[in-house]
Image: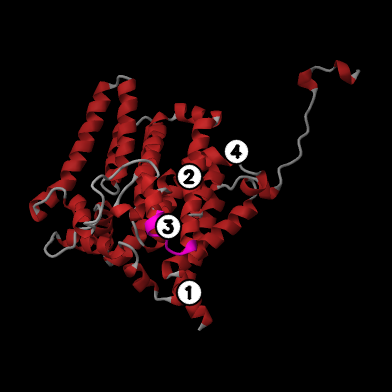
Amino acid sequence: MNPSLQSEAEITVVRPPVSFWKREPGLRETILIWAICAVVFIAVASAFRPYRSLVMDFGDTGAYVQIAEAIGSWSFSGIHVKQFWGVSYAVAVVYRLTGVSAATAILIVCSASSLLALVLAHRFWGGWVALFALTLNFDWWQRSLLGGSEPLFVALLFASFLMVRKERWLWAALLTSLATVTRPLGIFLLVGIGVVLLFRRQWLRFALSTLIGVVVGTLYILPLKLYLHDPLATVHSYERVHPAATSSLFGIPFYSIIVSTLRNRGPWTNVALTFGWIFLVLAGSIAMVATRQFRDYARSHPSEAIFAGLYLVSIYCYNGEGYYWSRAEFPRFAIPILPFVFLALLPCLPRWLVNDRRVIWILALVSSALAACSALGIQNVLARLRG
């Protein structure tokens, strides 16, 4: 038979096999990358300083541990009220159930939450997005392996996404409420859930979801009211510790970032790193609006899209700590939104960068090692190496 007369169904299209390194990382490989990077981080950090002392001196870890011990004994006299207590409650549960110290418990909570967030990210968005979003950020590694609120917050958020996708709205409301008492910007996902339920006219589910949020919030502030005589003690602690903070928590977009850069420049490497993340997230925000692929995603997952939009606006308008943290802590603030940023950006980036597993392996390993050096202080590391 003349090949030209064959029907289209009879024609077999032979495609070249996908190169081994071009295949998207599977879940096992994604977990393996996280585990090896965690070992690299701990090894680098321990080479320069005892790991336990680094943990207790890092960021707000000491404060979280102190509050967790107070919760475990239910004795709040003499504690230093700082940050929201969601992480401390989780740490108190772990160390009371397992018998380990609170310092060990916070590492268990944060590392397990970090790994869970990665697994859920892989389920939602695939290996490329999960690895780019959750292995390249220094602050993510530091909070995952030295203690912080971000890993638990992100894990609860992603678990809420899962419940929303399964339309288990009450579980989604509960998980989001727990995320909100860990970091307050979780309320944006509660707003997203409420808007979707109202749009669908699911009045009972909306009422029950709202009730869950109110109950969780009430249970959270009740001990603060009873024992510290201030239901908003965690909020007011910012005003006492940072009296120079601006009167308005949110303001004109980018204004506080510009003011912070002019007033507190810091080392040029730090400025370059933070502005790299600022511009990356800004490019991702533009791609979210400009690309049809992401607009289709937003229509399919409106609760997530509402959360992403409100969260993006908030971090660009944040005025906290007298403008200082607006730029300096931007990479940390951006962590929960990074999967959406890379989901929108990856189709626009060069294939050699985002479609080669060797690249993501190298970037992840280098990122974890540099994150450990950053936690120690780059100047301290360089001085030790010279000495």
Give the residue at mark 3.
139
Q: Secondary structure at mark 3?
A: helix
Q: Looking at the picture, does residue 253 appear above or below residue 151?
A: above
Give the residue at mark 4.
347
Q: Secondary structure at mark 2?
A: helix
Q: Is residue 126 left or right of residue 164?
A: right
Look at the numbered discs 1 and 4 and tell me whether their residues touch, using CB distance below 8 Å.
no
Q: What percent of the width, then of the height, locates residue 225?
A: 10, 49
Q: Looking at the picture, does residue 370 appear above or below residue 256?
A: below
The mark nearer the N terminus, 2 or 3, is 3
Q: Is residue 282 left or right of residue 181?
A: right
Three-letter residue code for mark 1: Val
Q: Is residue 227 left or right of residue 287?
A: left
Please tell me how crowded label 2 is: few (under 14), some (14-19), or many (20+) other residues with Cα within 10 Å.
many
Q: Which color scheme did the rendering employ for the protein? A: secondary structure
Give the residue at mark 1.
381
Span of residues in magenta: 261-268
Q: What percent of the width, then of the height, locates residue 279?
A: 50, 47
Give the residue at mark 2.
281
The mark nearer the N terminus, 3 or 1, is 3
Three-letter residue code for mark 2: Val
Q: Secondary structure at mark 4?
A: helix
Q: Residue at x 57, y 47 (%)?
A: 26
| Distance from Cα at disc 1 to Cα at disc 4 | 37 Å
Look at the numbered discs 3 and 1 and tell me whether their residues touch, using CB distance below 8 Å.
no
Look at the numbered discs 4 and 3 and tell me whether their residues touch, using CB distance below 8 Å.
no
Q: Secondary structure at mark 1?
A: helix
The mark nearer the N terminus, 2 or 4, is 2
The mark nearer the N terminus, 4 or 3, is 3
